[in-house]
Image (cartoon, rainbow, N blue to C red):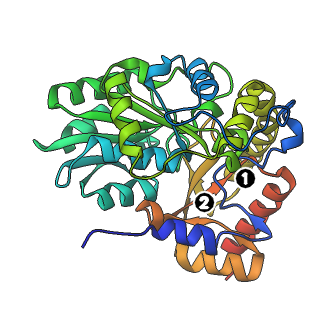
Amino acid sequence: MRLKHSDYMYWAKTRQSARYNLATSGVGAYPLSGIPNALDHLEINGNNSYGYAPLVNAIAAHTGADPDCVVTVQGTSFANHLAMAALIEPGDDVLIEQPAYELLVSTAAYIGGRVVRFLRREEDGYALRASEVLGALTPNTRLIVITNLHNPSSVLASQEELKAIGEIARHAGARVLVDEVYLDAVYPDTPASAFHLGPEFVVTSSLTKVYGVSGLRCGWILAQPDLARAMWRLNDLFAATPAHPAEIISVAAFAHLPAIREVARRIVDADRQALAEFLASTPHFRAARTAFGTTAFLRLIGGDVDEFEQVLREVEEVSIAPGRFFNSASHFRIGLGVNSAMFAEGLCRLDRAAAAP
């Protein structure tokens, strides 16, 4: 029987909340009042059967893609689901990075893919390496799945490695699915989407993690026009039409994305500085140092992460995302960009809990 649930999502919905919530993975919520003219043209219904044209065009302009390559969906998680459902058949091999976001793995398994892992090694700073992909490749590989920025570590993949992986996929008759929901957290000189590296690349993203407007569920897939059309038709099996008011507000948000991103950037930058100072001073944790992103992946030195998580929650009122959801039992993920005072206090409590006898 195929997997029909996500352990991580169940945990996130029932166990994540805490007074000092370090288990988040995106920036703090951005208020509707901060989006000028968001409600000026609000309607309940509109012409959005196969994409609301103003939103499709806004995403195309934001990503540099042709509008015919844009498929709008409800958030990145469903974008990944729809993309995988269109790209693989039951029994196909799906290469997925390790560590990886749990929902990518469980979704591939649910669709019927045979999940094969390739490593992003801690000792290599979780760098993406085409050689690891090539070493894991099988004759039945039809999809290679990557996150950029890497979830959970926030490591940025190099364009050279992405291009090399594209070449591997091209020769194998496979596609490369790149989840770029965190890529806009590279604030200066944000890289172009991997979609532009070649026709074998399919990209997913949304406004959820870097912009703080998760409730809009504004997600998208970038794919070649014939594949994009197939995804639109496949989506007919899942949803007739999206919520139109959210589409209208999303268009208004796209008109002000730089200003929205800048609000969160100040918090993320402050949290990253606090994290760097914390890691330099504590003997209890270590992590790959990254210049960008809203997550960090910490190793607990000499302890059990599941026991540590329980103590944190019960004694210190702190939540973290346990590494078991990323196939890394000695690690845990924390989030930046919500509230700097809360984040700094949470780090202090992490250290206090780890130092306790």
Q: Which residue is drawn at 49% across and 34% down?
A: 50
Pick the quarter of the image with the N terminus: bottom left
Question: In the shown orientation, is residue 167 left or right of residue 23?
Answer: left
Within-10-Å neighbours for mark 1: few <14, some 14–19, many 20+: some
Q: Which residue lies furthest to the right in this view?
A: 33
> Where residue 350 appears, x then y in whole percent?
71, 67
Q: Residue furthest left?
A: 139
Please tell me in which quadrant of the rendered image residue 127 appears. Answer: top left
> Where residue 253 appears, x then y in whole percent?
75, 32
225 or 306: nearer the viewer: 225
| Residue 120 in sight from this viewpoint | no
Q: What residue type is labelled 1?
A: Phe
Question: In the shown orientation, is residue 321 left or right of residue 344?
Answer: left
> Where residue 321 appears, x then y in whole percent?
58, 64
Q: Are marks 2 and 1 in contact (CB under 8 Å)?
A: yes
Q: Residue at x 37, y 61 (%)?
A: 106
The disc label shown at residue 285, or none: 2
278 or 115: nearer the viewer: 115
- Between the residue at mark 2 and the residue at mark 1, the CA separation in whole angstroms equals 9 Å
- Residue hosting label 1: 278
> Where residue 157 appears, x then y in whole percent?
46, 31
The disc label shown at residue 84, or none: none
Please tell me in which quadrant of the rendered image residue 126 appears. Answer: top left
Pick the quarter of the image with the C terminus: bottom right
Mark 1: which secondary structure?
Answer: helix
Q: What residue type is labelled 2?
A: Phe
Within-10-Å neighbours for mark 2: few <14, some 14–19, many 20+: some
